[in-house]
Amino acid sequence: MTTMGIAAPSPLRESMPLKHVAAAVIGNALSFYDFLTYSFFSIQIGHAFFPSKDPAVSLLASLGVFGVGFVGRPIGSIVIGTMGDRIGRKPAMILSFTMLGCAIVGLALTPSYAAIGIAAPILAIVFRLLQGFALGGEVGPTTAFLLEAAPPNRRGFYTSMQATTQDFAILCAGLVGVVLAHALSPETFDAYGWRIAFLIGAAIVPFGLLIRRSLPETLHAARPVAQEPGGVRNYLPIAFLGFAMLASATITSYLLTYMTTYATDTLRLPVQLSFWATIVNGGCGVVFDSLSGWLSDRVGRKPIMITCWTLMLILAVPCYAAMVRAPSATTLLGATAVLSVLAAFGGTPIVIALTEALPARIRSGTLAITYAFAISIFGGSAQAIVKTLIVITHNPLAPAWYWTGAMVVGLAGMIAMRETAPRRKAV
């Protein structure tokens, strides 16, 4: 049996070796820990590299550099993602992980503006570009590897490990933030807390490189099985629908990760409490991402996506309204939990469906490029846009309305996308 250019595994193989799963997802976890830690500490990083008498200007400058990292993503997706289709998934994964390690250490050790002046923000921009380049090339090869190495009837579950490790990274970043916020004085936390958080993530780089070198190659095993007719243009409609769904999902993801900053900057809640929103977001994702992947193998990708996105469309504004009217631990964490569960459950099948729908010979590159452009355009701008909207309109519900628009776009793509789960294709 063959499916979408994926080599059929032995009937006796019902699972992937744990070390192969770990090798694939460790880079993904570090990528998102690194990339999202910047978001969580954007206020403190703004103070270090963009000091200003106006806190809003400092934060907007910091968020602007956060967005700069997304400029590197499309370039990395083209270079490293297509490398995964030409040379192999393994060398592409090793390259992206190595570059990511260099970037995270470099940013953590960059002196502040007070120490080296204009060179500080310039170096921050360079390292953010390198981070984006590496992450842009990370998603395609690793997701393709997980899909191709998994048994057909468990592809959803194993591919969902990408989303699970992303949210595990969010959880870890939140826990690190809470510990540092409680352990350090406000002055020390503002000056060095974010650097410590980055260096904690960098500590796993040597281990990650070691286990990635032990991975088998799945590209060459998949190619001989099915040579799909037609060129890349035949799959442009799939890429377009995937782009719409991923744009919606990335706005959802980055507005959830912005919740820590939103709670501190807009709701005026204590930073120690705000970081708990990150922990709730990550914890919900760790639990429900893999559950969603498992369930999508049984009922299909589309029913889960459409149901969760419809519920978020209905609940986004009421959840934000509750936080604004009564800012407290209960409303912040409750609203974050509701939206995080729906985002985790509904967002996981999006990447699974898109990866499944693409043939092996263009899977890594097409997925990487589609993902990177969606993330770069909408993820890179989401936090700066909602902060700007709040400043201009003086309406703290601006993020909810922006989120609602994203849900509409995502639902349109989900409805138009065909079902890809093997057990549901004939239904």
Image (spheres, rainbow, N blue to C red):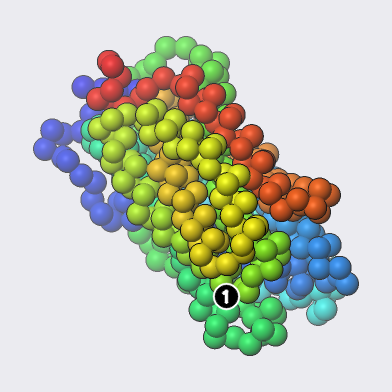
Looking at the picture, which amino acid does disc 1 mark?
A: Gln
Outermost residue toward the left in this view = 12
Does residue 148 appear to the left or right of 11 in the view shown? right
**Is residue 29 in view?**
no
- Foreground pick, 77 / 278: 278
Label 1, residues with CA under 10 Å away: few <14, some 14-19, many ≥20: some
Q: Is residue 110 visible?
A: yes
Q: Where is residue 383 in the image (x, y as percent from the top left)?
A: 68, 51
Residue in view at x 51 percent, y 56 percent: 336
The image quarter containing residue 78 is top right
Q: Which residue lies furthest to the right in this view?
A: 53
User: Looking at the rendering, in which quadrant would you find the C terminus?
Assistant: top left
The residue lying at 47 percent from left, 64 percent from top is 279
Quarter residue 64 falls in: bottom right
Can you give x and y, in whole percent of width and height, for residue 264 in the image?
66, 67
Give the total of numbered labels. Answer: 1
Q: In which quarter of the image is the N terminus?
A: top left
**Can you say whether 191 is above or below 248 in the image?**
below
- Looking at the image, residue 354 sits to the left or right of residue 264; the answer is left
On screen, 356 above or below 183? above
Residue 333 or 124: which is nearer the viewer?
333
Q: Nearer the viewer, residue 345 or 361?
A: 345
Q: Which residue shows up at 67% across the image and 41% down it?
A: 402
Q: Hey, which residue is sitting farthest front in the picture?
A: 325
Where is residue 15 drawn, in percent x and y? Answer: 20, 44
Secondary structure under the numbered disc 1 in the rendered image:
helix
Which residue is labeled 1 in the image? 272
Picture residue at 30% right of the left edge, 51% below the top? 20
Front residue of this view, candidates 341 and 117: 341
Residue 277 percent across, percent down from the top left: 53, 63
